[in-house]
Amino acid sequence: MKKFLKFVCGAASMAAVAFGAYCVYKNVVAKKDEDDFDDFDDYFEEEETESVDENREYVSINITEEATDAAEEAADALEEAAEEIKEAVEDVVEEITEE
């Protein structure tokens, strides 16, 4: 029983040392790496905001009568196709119900 208790205490102390080393690494060593990347983020943010504001152009949208006519023709063609599909499905359903 004494040997088992020594083993458990030794394993617990090794786990505590490993956890302490992890905490030191996380709070001290890894923080230095994060600080290095912060400088680059600021550089890119400043550059993007300047170029977007100065070179912005707007394009007007002109809807002509030809475009509206073409849209109406396309809508009519879709309605006709939907009606033909509806009739074909009704025919097939009638054939199935008759059998």
Image (cartoon, rainbow, N blue to C red):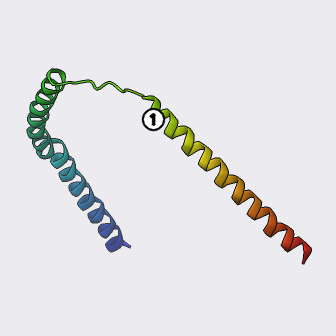
Residue most extreme to the bottom: 99
Give residue 26's position: percent from left, percent from top. 19, 46
Residue 42, image quadrant: top left
| Nearer to us in this view, 72 or 94 | 72
Residue found 62% across the figure and 44% down from its top: 76
Q: Quadrant of the C terminus?
A: bottom right
Residue found 65% across the figure and 47% down from its top: 79
Q: Quadrant of the N terminus?
A: bottom left
| Nearer to us in this view, 32 or 9 | 32
Kindly identify the amino acid type of the residue bearing the numbered disc 1.
Ala
Give residue 31's position: percent from left, percent from top. 14, 41
Give residue 91's position: percent from left, percent from top. 81, 66
Residue most extreme to the right: 98
Residue 87, image quadrant: bottom right
Residue 46, image quadrant: top left
Residue for badge 1: 67
| Nearer to us in this view, 53 or 22 | 53
* Left or right, 79 with reference to 7: right
* Left or right, 6 with reference to 44: right
Residue found 35% across the figure and 72% down from its top: 4
* Left or right, 91 with reference to 36: right
Give residue 21's position: percent from left, percent from top. 18, 52
